[in-house]
Image (tube, rainbow, N blue to C red):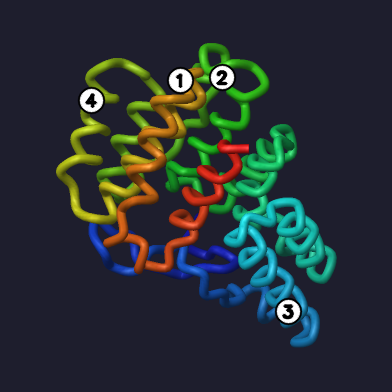
Amino acid sequence: MRCLVLLVVALRTTSLRVSRRRLAVAAPAPLATLASPAVASDARTYARQGMSAFEKGEVEESIALFDAAEEADPRYATRLWQRGLSYYYADRFKDARKQFLMDVAENPNDTEEAVWHLLAMARTEGLGKARPQMIKMGRDPRRVMRTVEEAFRNGDAESIGALEAIATDGGAGDRFYASLYRGLLAEAAGQPKVSADWISRAVENKEYAASGDYMYALAKVHQSRRKK
């Protein structure tokens, strides 16, 4: 979720260009410089394994592996945005909030950090109380994520309608993200059927499935966990 992200350096897209959330993992330069090669290699290995476990729906196992990455190199703690997502699906919402706050400090212009912090807060306090506490971010360069932010921050018919329009008419990547976050917003608002429909649209976006985006795997995990 960031320019100097632990696991991903990627392009911000509005179509099928490679997502910044691809599953490839590379150590950021500061960590590679400061940590011994063995420590950096161990941390990267654990992080990759954690991502793989999450992709397979093994949420609790992924957390243990992300924790092992941090234990191998504590500097990884503020870059493990993937662990925040795993915390969310393990219903560890306070831990998720803490992780996303650390993530915001790393990259204050990525809307998704603020959105996921809000989602975790909404699960314990309700969307109405959580929304006024949504973290203020810088300007995200992606139009779809600026629209997502408006929908989450305001929750009015106009901003939600704009998000739904992108989910219908945007490029493959934008349609995926708009559908995913529309579904997540509906879940936070206590609308499980609406949420399931939008998440299904995200998962059924087979054109985007080929991108290798970690968030596509998340949409599938979400769908699977909510059916239980």
- State the separation of the CA atoms marked 4 and 1: 16 Å
Q: Secondary structure at mark 1?
A: loop
- Say whether marks 3 and 4 touch (CB < 8 Å): no
Residue 109, how many percent across, how many down?
43, 47
* Kind of residue indicated by mark 2: Ala
3 or 4: tag closer to the N-terminus: 3
Choose between 114 and 128: the one closer to the eye.
128
Residue topped by disc 3: 40
- Front of the two marks 1 and 3: 1
Q: Earlier in the sequence, mark 1 or mark 3?
A: 3
Mark 2 → mark 1, Cα distance in angstroms: 16 Å
> Spatial distance from mark 3 to mark 2, Cα to Cα?
37 Å
In the picture of the structure, the residue carrying the numbered disc 4 is: 161
Q: Where 53 sits versus 87, above or below?
A: below
Give the percent coordinates (x, y) of residue 218: 52, 51
Whether residue 205 is visible to the viewer of this picture, yes or no, is yes
Percent across and percent down for residue 97 are 66, 36
Q: For the point 57% across and 77% down, which residue is it? A: 26
Location of the C terminus by quadrant is top right
| Residue 191 - label | 1
Residue 74 in the figure: left or right of residue 15: right
User: Could you say which disc has been placed on residue 130 in the image?
Assistant: 2
- The x, y position of residue 46, in whole percent, is 73, 71
